[in-house]
Image: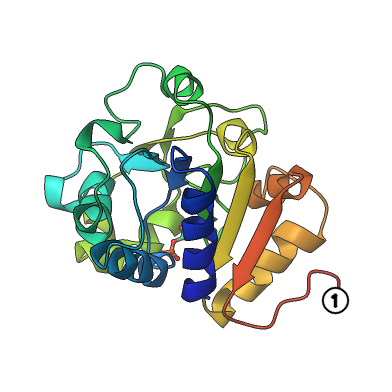
Amino acid sequence: MSLRVAEAVAGQLRAKPDSCLGLPTGRTPLGCYQVLAQWSRLGSLDWRSATCFALDEYINVADEMSFAHYLETNIFRYTNLPADRQFTPLAVDDYESLIRRAGGLDLILVGIGHNGHIAFNEPGTPKLSWTHCTWLTESTRQANAALFGSEDRVPTMAVTMGVQTILTARRVLLIASGQQKHGILQRALADGVNSDVPASFLQEHPHLEVFTDFDFDRNSR
Ligand code: PGA
């Protein structure tokens, strides 16, 4: 799965070297970033003209636990992506304008949370949402407790691209790893569109590509 996702991202960068990419954090994209890092180190992938936007960022978090740090250590440091074209929504007044001025997102990579969130668009987030601050749900904080040592150390707030920000991307790559994501992916893609499962809004995107490392057929139950 990681190789196929990496091939899709690399293909995008080769076809359009000045691509704007939306990049997630979390466990799911780590393998893909490893492959991309390897290709970049070998010089077969050129990020010089690309622009990258983090999907989200915690508010009030130690630097080393931030998503900016995650992206730097897992992918950016291995590439020739210029530092002034790496963006995070944290210190930006108007992320939407920034993305628009960069030409709009050509490709966005998104994971899915156990509760159906995409980026930090938690259940209940409306479709018409742009970059915003949000409280994290208990289930999201539980899911990330191990990374922080305990749930009470997980930040309570974050800033995230909205559902609409994600839907404006020209291509959306949804990635899910581990059988335990099967049920929520099924709800997101096979049931109706519903803000209880924000990932279900992706059904409305004309260029959604789904990558899993388990058998998944959205038409079967
Ligand atoms: P994960 O997170 O990749 O660590 O499972 C996915 C998400 O919460 O969006």
Q: Is residue 179 above or below residue 71?
A: below
Q: What colour scheme governs how the chains and residues are painted in the rendered image of this protein?
A: rainbow
185 with respect to 114 (left or right): right
Q: Quick one: label 1, few (<14), some, or many (20+) residues within 10 Å?
A: few
Q: Is residue 88 above or below residue 13?
A: above
Q: How many marks?
A: 1
195 with respect to 178 (left or right): right
Pick the front one: 15 or 112: 15
Amino acid identity at mark 1: Ser
Residue at screen point 38% across, 72% down: 31
Residue 146 on image: x %, y %: 27, 69
- Name which quarter of the figure residue 54 lies in: top left
- Kindly tell me whether mark 1's CB lies below 8 Å from ligand 1: no
Residue 23 on image: x %, y %: 42, 48
Residue 158 on image: x %, y %: 36, 38
- Residue that badge 1 annotates: 220
25 with respect to 213 (left or right): left
Residue at screen point 61% across, 68% down: 211
Residue at screen point 44% across, 25% down: 102
Residue at screen point 37% across, 60% down: 26
Q: Quadrant of the C terminus?
A: bottom right
